[in-house]
Image (cartoon, rainbow, N blue to C red):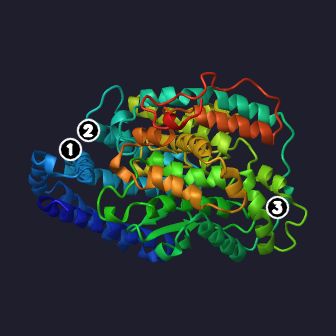
Amino acid sequence: MTSFFTPFREAYGELADLNATLQVLSWDQQTCMPPKGAEVRARQMATLEGILHEKVIDPRWDDLLAEARARADELTADERAFVREFRLERERRVKLPTALVKELALAQAEGFEAWHSARRKSEFSLFAPCLERLLSLTRQKADCFGWTETPWNALVEDFERGMTAARLREIFAPLETALPALVERIRSAPQVPIRFLAQKWNTARQREFNERVARDLGYDFEAGRLDIAPHPFTTDFGIRDVRITTRYNENSCLDSLSGTIHETGHALFEQGFRGEDERTLLAASPSYGVHESQSRFWEIFIGQSRPFWEHYLPILRQYFPGQLTDVDAETMYRAINRVEPSLIRVDADEVTYNLHILIRFNIELDLLDGRLTVRDLPAEWNRRYRALLGVDVPDDARGCLQDVHWAYGSFSYFPSYTLGNMYAAMLAEAMERDRPMLREDVAAGRFAGILEWLREKIHRVGRRMEAIPLIEQATGECVGSEALLRHLTRKYADIYRLPTIANPSPEGRKEAANNPARKNEKT
Ligand code: ZN
């Protein structure tokens, strides 16, 4: 290690420790804490957040960063990447006045409470004043960062650095045109049978099966654990302690499994960072979209694939004797992939999910740019659901109050979900080009090669690269929604036996300018 860099590394290590400690408190809060512990826990976490914030903006970092800049030549490439990431992150923190940070924290706490009771009573007006306040503070926050075109662009930097609303509009445009048409074709086709799923599924057995699948995929239970949480999530306290959660419902054997595989995907990413990156900023994802690509890759491209069910259906039968006797792998595959436009984003299928995101993306822009008032939000929400998904929203609880994000003051986060789907589709295509045995591997329950491919292309890189260059380097393609559309069109034409239509992306694959994959391609 470069000697003058040691103080920098150790100072950052302390920030990483504090942050991990906050994660432990948060994990406990969401999995085991008794309800009466909530109040004091909120105080404990706020105190730690305050200490962390003070430590990040500490002026002593100015000297450490100045020295790192002046002696950049003496640093290794990894150290330079570490400094760059920290500098960018700290610059944003320093721009926010402490008074605004505190006011936002308070508004978020109140917003969450108000949202919770508004949703319970399905009455948007109870949340509206809080949302007004959150929006106004969020605009102030964006002003502190500085922005062009829309304040939304300043906020998205926390999730997808370098992305803008204009670029996203361009990337999402093909989805907005093609997906409603695909949904329409699916709806007019004969529906897939799902009645066999309407049984009671012992939750203890579900849990055993989920653990088995997570282990098979490569999740290391010596460096993690699987618990129950009402809103499933993954958290890490270090590379060797990455925890996942899921929730069980005895009326469904597939929901907890999808949740487990999704969180396993997030966790495999975290368990796959390089050991030497521990307590540095390199052991992290370059963006939320990239993180989501890992969860969606395993959940959709592996866990909802035909070969996966060829392998796992006989195993699942052993966990639920007599319950799946008449079901074959093809029936299971079609059932798990059924498409049905619905009201709730988190329950949505793979095709309609992105439409839920597009609606939120457009509404956020309208709110932040002042084209839409908070008062008119429910009506606008309902109008867009009817137009894009063809469903009528019966009440606000199942409408604009369903997600917690805005109550937390989190604007511009939603597109990360669709970016994750796009990146996952691009990675799946690239992997198939690189690994012609992919299908056979999944059908035989062999996942090590698949995981190793992701480890090499994504996990071990961590935050050394930014999101878009990382995905383009891994896939040899320009980032766009074409791969996702190709995947959805092909897969659902097959499942619903739709008559063939023209290729959804006439230009075909768009290769990245600096295409590392091209060298290996056979023409
Ligand atoms: Zn996720």
Position of residue 233 measured from the top left corner of the image (x, y, whole percent): 51, 61
Q: Which residue is mark 2?
A: 145
How far apart, in angstroms, are the residues tagged by discs 1 and 3?
54 Å
Q: CA distance from mark 3 to mark 2?
A: 51 Å
Asked if residue 130 lies left or right of residue 379, the reply is left
Q: Is residue 9 left or right of residue 368?
A: left
Horizontal relation, residue 397 to residue 99: left or right: right
Look at the numbered discs 1 and 2 and tell me whether their residues touch, using CB distance below 8 Å. Answer: yes
> Can you give x and y, in whole percent of width and height, for residue 492 in the image?
75, 39
- The answer to which of marks 1 and 3 sits earlier in the sequence is 1
- In the displayed structure, 417 sits above or below 14; it is above
SS at circle 2: helix
Query: In the rendered structure, which amino acid carries the disc numbered 3?
Result: Ala
Q: Position of residue 455 (x, y in %)?
A: 48, 56
Label for residue 198?
3
- Residue at which label 1 appears: 95
**In this image, 201 relative to 507: left or right?**
right
**Viewer-proximal residue among 440 and 110:** 440
